[in-house]
Amino acid sequence: QVQLVESGGGVVQPGRSLRLSCAASGFTFSRYSIHWVRQSPDKGLEWVAVVSYDGSKKYLADSVKGRFTISRDNAKNTLYLQMNSLRVDDTAVYYCVREQWLVFDYWGQGTLVTVSS
Amino acid sequence: EIVLTQSPATLSLSPGERATLTCRASQRVSTSVAWYQQKPGQAPRLLIYDASNRATGIPARFSGGGSGTDFTLTISRLEPEDFAVYYCQQRANWYTFGQGTKLEIK
């Protein structure tokens, strides 16, 4: 069955960096675009970033552009989110999400990122 | 940015009743709307895509409708496991989500 398992969350001070990972299994990872979506009590569900199936196309939300980088390693079936210059309002649960025909069909269980001094 | 407004914020119903949730988009989005269910401590789960298509494994009591700016999610007869938070999402112009409707037991 399709599984997406996020890791790398934690508590970090404002201005610092964190890298999230998402390990995929149960499907052919290299055939799908994968997204990061975050959820916080203040802002609700918010789309963050997407990388195309082969890694050639990457798009980020304006709120994270210039600070976050999305990447993937298809040999390792793993997605990454490098988060730099973290801000308090980046605090959220971060979900790794598979896309099929622009539909978010499978979600990971999420990893919590808390940005606090 | 396309803003999605869901109503009501909270819906109190009993098992066996019919639930109708609405989602209004600030611009026309054709039928590019999906609905998700989220239970406490869990990730969202896809229920409906392209406004009216049930995702794999979703019971027939869930149905979606609408086009343009107004969309509905209907649960024909509520089961105890249906009480959760429901979100709509559009994919016509990037991706945005509604703020959610909490369906609670009356």
Image: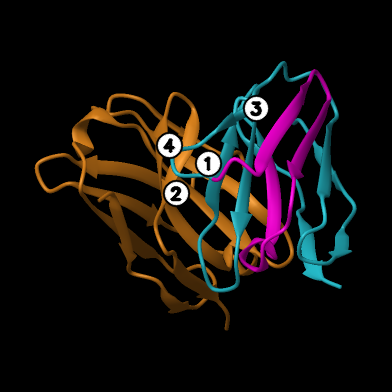
Of pointers 4 and 1, the one earlier in the residue sequence: 4
- Which quarter of the figure has residue B106? bottom right
Residue at image mark 3: B52
Q: Amino acid at mark 2?
A: Phe
Q: Amino acid at mark 4?
A: Val
- Image position, residue A47 (x, y; %): 57, 44
User: What element does badge 3 sit on?
Assistant: loop
Callout 3 and callout 2 share a chain: no
Residue B81 higher or lower than A105, as above or below: below
Q: Is residue A12 left or right of residue A62?
A: left
Distance, label 4 to label 1, CA atoms, is 12 Å
Q: Which residues are magenta?
A: B59-88
Label 2 near label 3: C-beta < 8 Å? Answer: no
- Of labels 3 and 2, the one closer to you: 3
- Residue drawn 64% across the image and 53% down it: A45
Label 1 near label 2: C-beta < 8 Å? Answer: yes
Distance, label 2 to label 1, CA atoms, is 6 Å
The circle on residue A65 is 1
Distance, label 3 to label 2, CA atoms, is 34 Å
- Residue drawn 76% across the image and 30% down it: B2
Which chain's residue wears label 3? Answer: B
Residue at image mark 4: A50
Residue at image mark 2: A68
According to the rendering, which colour does chain A have?
Answer: orange
Q: Amino acid at mark 3?
A: Ser
Label 4 near label 2: C-beta < 8 Å? Answer: no
User: What element does badge 4 sit on?
Assistant: strand
- Of labels 4 and 1, the one closer to you: 4
User: What element does badge 1 sit on?
Assistant: loop
The stretch drawn in magenta includes residue B3: no
- Of labels 3 and 4, the one closer to you: 3
According to the rendering, which colour does chain B have?
Answer: cyan
